[in-house]
Image (cartoon, rainbow, N blue to C red):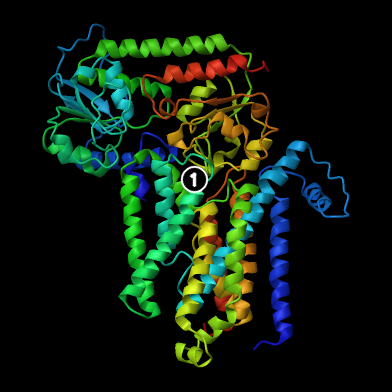
Amino acid sequence: MSAPRRVLRAYGTAAAFLAAAVLLSAMVGAADLNPWATASALLDKLPFVDLHSGLSPLDQAVLFQIRMPRIVLGALVGGLLSLAGAGYQGVFRNPLVDSGLLGASAGAGLGATIAIVYLGGSGPATVPAAAFVGSLVGVAVAYLAGAAAGTGTATLLLAGLAVGMFLTAIQTLVLQRSAQDIQQVYSWLLGSLATGDWHQVVEILPYAAVSTLAILLHGRHLDVLSVGDEEARTLGMRPARIRLVVVAACALAAASAVAVSGLIGFVGIIVPHAVRRLAGTSYRLVLPLSLLFGAGFLVLADTLARTVLAPGELPIGVVTAVIGSPVFIWILRTTRAVRT
Amino acid sequence: MRARQRNNRRGPLVRSLTAATTALAVAAVLAGCSSGGSTTATSSSSPSAAATAASFPVTVAASNGKVTVKSAPKRIVSLSPTATEDLYAVGAGRQVVAVDSDSNYPSNAPVTKLSGLTPNVEAIIKYSPDLVVASADSGGLVAQLTKVGVPVLIEPAVTKLDDAYDQIQQIGTATGHRAQARQTVTSMKSAIAADVAKAGTAHKGLSYYWEVSANPYYSVTSQTFIGQIVSLFGLKNIADAADKASDGGYPQLSQEYIVTAKPQLILLSDNSAADGGQSPAVVAKRPGWSGVPAVKNSQIVGLDDDIASRWGPRLPQLVAQIAQALEKAPAQ
């Protein structure tokens, strides 16, 4: 499809974007660490490099225990949400679907709310685990409901919508019964990376790796599916089975992200579309590029979230929408329309 | 948006939103009555001595305007945990027939399923109240109850210590316990003054971080009610630097800022299991926090979350808890 050169250039751009986002993000923050000392402290961690950063132990703790895990977590979450969004868009042949689809966000919200209200949100892992399970259960119920209602992707989407509404209503009901937890629940629903630590990175890494691999391996299948189920069958593929696998993998990816960050909307829809504008519509390229650009995008968004009002913070959802929307429209305007 | 009608029991964010909504509602009520009355929460009762239960009808200027109580109320419904505490403190407890589901003090208060956040007027009327006290005029509470002749006092979250005292006086006046209310306020004032005096000036300038919630990190500035209380000890609030992050005085702080601001004292109002379980032990174990002076010196205090989020008669206990923590802190 694409010339190898164009592919290489696209990967190069994406990798450079992500690297630049991470480096920039590491060098700024409310703690006012010296940017050059920060850079050298980071380089010092590389093998065979020995630099003296001059950072105090407290500053080192801030950099390596607070700032860096947050950046890595942001990259993971952004990458997973974008990849899941792109995967869903391929499965449903619908450019408007997002990673929160099919009851995933609603299920995660219900899970987190139940954990906060009934389990007191105690213990660092309760809420993420509940959100993770809730997200997967939401998707599973939507999938089964959709399959029971008939075939076709539109039915599945509508079933997902209905299940999502239902779960959101239950969540509101639970919340209504326990007013004192409202602030905690809403903070979670708005999404945040503010408390990210290495522990969370390690916790979601296995799920992130498995789901990412599964989605990336299906790029070619999604390309064929985009032509039509008939064509796919003539090539010996089983569309229903491919859909199930990709949906499951996307659900796992989104659930891992949501578990540690809460609900961060919008990323899963704008990043894949921006990628299509830059690199064409083949899923073999859109999927991996969405992963990389999504990671860089969320790192940048979170950098703004924690620096614009420093030492205060902005909710990250506000940043992704306020910065993301105009940038997205600009990308739409300045690039040649490509069929999506 | 949905958060607007809600909680006053906890959560300053929600509380400030509610306060804004209440202000709007008050404005609307005033416009409707074309009344130019004051909306400040000051009692209109004269500070004359020897006021007794016999002095009805009384008029108090609550935040919802002037409210007249015709005779000594015998069936009071409280929809606000703070108001419930106030009612019992001024000696009106025996007149209380129902309190909302969030009112958990004192323990003998008649807790019901009534909600103060999304009040159901019909459910309230079932208790045939002759006075209703709430902290917000949610869902047209005042208008509807006024229609059926039930006086309503709206006593919203305060921003100044003096306003908290005023509310206690108002509740005392409206329930026929003016003298005991004055006594309550006087003893609160002297208890607080005694603790502050005892702490002295040895800790002036000691820096502190007040944690409202941990995910994300919300704090209070010195402008808030709670911030003013801690300021009585002359402590320095690290959240003041983030003032621009929130008009309401409840900024979300960057974790790395909290750590590098090196607070010498950490006060937690999110430490109970129901509030997020951020106990001193949990806070001490947070990655990257070990170098914070308050963590190194074990100067982390788990406050009583309820007292710290209300503006009622138990405030001296909060002050005492802070004073106790300061006793162990090194002098500045």
Q: Residue at x 34, y 41 (%)?
A: A178
Direction from residue B253 to residue A131 in the image, left or right: left
| Res. B70 in view | yes
Which quadrant of the view contains residue B315?
top left
Task: Return the x and y of residue A78 as percentages of the image width and height.
Answer: 59, 62
* Mark 1 element type: helix
Q: Up-down: is B176 above or below B267? A: above
Q: Quadrant of the N terminus of chain A?
A: bottom right
Direction from residue A276 to residue A159 in the image, left or right: left
Label 1 sits on residue: A126
Q: Up-down: is A141 above or below B154? A: below
For mark 1, does the 10 Å Cα neighbourhood hold few (<14), some (14 to 19), or many (20 or more) residues? some
Which of A36/A61 is in front? Answer: A61
Q: Residue at x 71, y 83 (%)?
A: A6
Direction from residue B114 to residue A119 in the image, left or right: right
Q: Residue at x 68, y 39 (%)?
A: B288
Task: Return the x and y of residue B59 as percentages of the image width and height.
Answer: 20, 23
Which of A217/B237 is in front? Answer: A217
Which amino acid, mark 1? Thr
Q: Residue at x 22, y 10 (%)?
A: B51
Which quadrant of the view contains residue B30?
top left
| Res. A95 in view | no
Task: Return the x and y of residue A213 as percentages of the image width and height.
Answer: 61, 70
